[in-house]
Amino acid sequence: MAKKILLPIDLNSPASWIKPLAEAQDMLIKGGELHVVSVLPDFGMSMVGTFFKAGFEQTALHQFGEALRNWVKQNVPGAVEVHPHILHGNIYDEILRAADKLDVDLIILAAHRPEAKDYLLGPNAARVVRHAKQSVYVVRG
């Protein structure tokens, strides 16, 4: 039974968290910790960053953190020990790094139905499944 669960979510996509959150809550009914993470992607290439005003990333991270804290208050019952984490960078890399750093037992994440492009590029969920040291529970929604 998992005692520390990592739940990666996309704040803008309820499909990324409605069913996975319910599964995590069911698993933690007898106690444990829920670590909710959301990743703010970086600019990718340094030249992209030059198009934004100075301090944009810090402001975005602060606002993103507030949005995640509000999401937790609205969606996670008080009986669950929950820790929100804002990550910044490549989505699947940050999820894997957080899982290792937080020493979680299980990663629960949503996956959409694969499209043709996913077979060529590989979605974030597939990369997490392939490279995670922890067990990964993929919830289809």
Image (tube, rainbow, N blue to C red):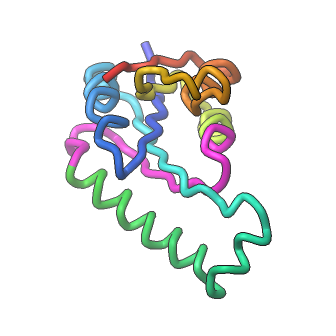
Q: Residue furthest right?
A: 46
Above or below, 42 relative to 22: below
Above or below, 41 relative to 56: above
**Segment colored magenta:** 75-94
| Residue at x-position 67% and y-position 80% | 51
- Quadrant of the image occupied by residue 22: top left
How many marks are shown on the rendered structure? 0
Indicate the position of residue 88 as horizontal and vertical percent values: 62, 57
Q: Residue furthest front?
A: 116
Quarter that holds the C terminus: top left
Quarter that holds the N terminus: top left
- Quadrant of the image occupied by residue 75: top left
Above or below, 12 relative to 57: above
Left or right side of 44 for 112: left
Indicate the position of residue 15 as horizontal and vertical percent values: 31, 35
| Residue at x-position 48% and y-position 46% | 37
| Residue at x-position 70% and y-position 74% | 49
Residue 126 is inside the magenta segment: no
Q: Residue furthest bottom?
A: 54
Left or right side of 34 for 133: right
Above or below, 80 relative to 38: above
The residue nearer to you, when weighing 90 against 25, is 90
| Residue at x-position 37% and y-position 44% | 82
Indicate the position of residue 27 as horizontal and vertical percent values: 32, 19
Indicate the position of residue 2 as horizontal and vertical percent values: 45, 19
